[in-house]
Image (cartoon, coloured by chain):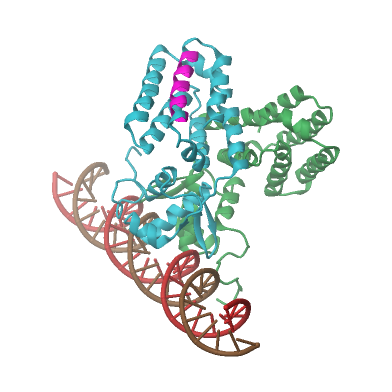
Chain colours: A cyan, B green, C brown, D red
Amino acid sequence: MADVMMDSGQGVSNGRDVTDLVLQDILAGVLLPGTWLKQIDLERRYNCTRPEVRRALDRLAQKRLVEHVPNRGYHVYEPDGRRAREVSEIRIILETAIVGTIIQNASPADIANLRGLAEQFDFMVLNGTMLELYEANLAFHRQLLILGGNQELVDLITEIRQRTSSAPVSQWRTRARVEQSGREHHLMVDAIEAADTERLKELVRQHILQG
Amino acid sequence: MADVMMDSGQGVSNGRDVTDLVLQDILAGVLLPGTWLKQIDLERRYNCTRPEVRRALDRLAQKRLVEHVPNRGYHVYEPDGRRAREVSEIRIILETAIVGTIIQNASPADIANLRGLAEQFDFMVLNGTMLELYEANLAFHRQLLILGGNQELVDLITEIRQRTSSAPVSQWRTRARVEQSGREHHLMVDAIEAADTERLKELVRQHILQG
DNA sequence: GTAACCTAAATTGGCGCCAATTTTGGATAC
DNA sequence: GTATCCAAAATTGGCGCCAATTTAGGTTAC
């Protein structure tokens, strides 16, 4: 039970699963919305077998990151304004609902930890790839959510955050927006330190609405 | 081989996907928590092919309804007290967050529609199978959520509701509990009719906590 | 009598092949 | 010159086979 389990060990250049590789390329903007994902191409690109590609595509279709058209293939989901708005609304509901618990649970060590992750994000803005920046952002928010004390909620938000994959990439093109995000991270930590629930709620809300 | 004529292409007697069939059997309590799902057995039980079984198991593993142990197989998730509690908390956050919008959007026709679904649930308590009851309950809550005006949220709640599969089945064993659920449905519709937001919130909260 | 080891059966999981369907390119008719 | 139809190439998706791993049972040694 304590063994490290990896689904498919061969055919992959990296050690990771093919699903994650395709996912990363979608998030990084390499595979643009609308692109048809031909199985042959993916097979060659990720140096893996046909069944692995098919399983990855099926999983991504389940996650609603790609759309499956029978006998036609899979293509990356087009950004949908309505859906993006609805997902934002859900995130605001969930993430503002637990700020009270976050502030209650946050120890000085936790706050220092968060501050470090916020600074790491700032660092990646200057000297990091788009993917590293994305992951630094994810790490900060993940640590924030963990303080909410609901592991299931952490996983859920991490999951639905991926559903608006194309939105963040397109919005993050401007450096000004990213730098603003970095500042907001620090303001959030400040609010936790000051135990100001209402201020943190408003910050989280604004942060989500602006990507 | 000449006993049953089946549609070509799909090895399923029903028109539905194998994934749904396994899912329903888990929800109905036919496949109990902890059961090892041998591919051969499922192949025969649902009269389908090996790849279909494997795809279904992979999808259910993604949804965290079954657990995958490499080179050992798949087994139905054991009910986890902590997880069930966390999922309930998430449902309460989401479903109480939109009661305001529900009451705003509910037209007299919508209310009549909900009332009908609540009565259909009552009918199924007396003259219906466990599955029909489960689906009648799902239909009521789905219609309720649709009034929230966020399609993505409807899908999300429908999805996470399945994550505590074993809990409802075991709790629904007592008829008293089910009849109480039926009464609560009507009380919810009453609260919508009276446009009493706070009361509806409390009803939803209690309804979720009691399964 | 018990424990450890070894062999055989069963199960999982990767892989490639082939049929069904769609798309594309070109030829023909108007 | 353009539209329609047909054929060939490409792509998807279903299916079964075989290797790798695990499990169970029986035998042997202590």
Quarter of the rendering occupied by the N terminus of chain B: bottom right
Number of callouts: 0
Tell me: residue A57, above or below residue B165: below
Regarding residue B87, the answer to whether it shows in the image is yes
Write the start and end of the magenta stretch as one range: A177-192
Residue B93, how many percent across, how many down?
Answer: 62, 27
Q: Nearer the viewer, residue A158 or A35?
A: A35
Q: Quadrant of residue A117?
A: top left
Q: Nearer the viewer, residue A171 or B168?
A: A171
Q: Is residue A186 magenta?
A: yes
Tell me: residue A51, above or below residue A126: below
Give the residue displayed 50% in from the left and 15% down from the top. A103
Regarding residue B78, the answer to whether it shows in the image is no
Residue furthest to the top in view is A194
Residue A20, how many percent across, how many down?
Answer: 39, 45
Tell me: residue B65, above or below residue B183: below
Main SS type for the magenta part?
A: helix
Give the residue displayed 34% in from the left and 29% down from the top. A126
Residue A85, how many percent across, how many down?
Answer: 61, 37
Q: Nearer the viewer, residue B134 or B115?
A: B115
Tell me: residue D13, above or below residue B165: below
Give the residue displayed 81% in from the left and 40% down from the top. B110
Q: Is residue B98 magenta?
A: no
Residue A136, how many percent across, how many down?
Answer: 39, 30
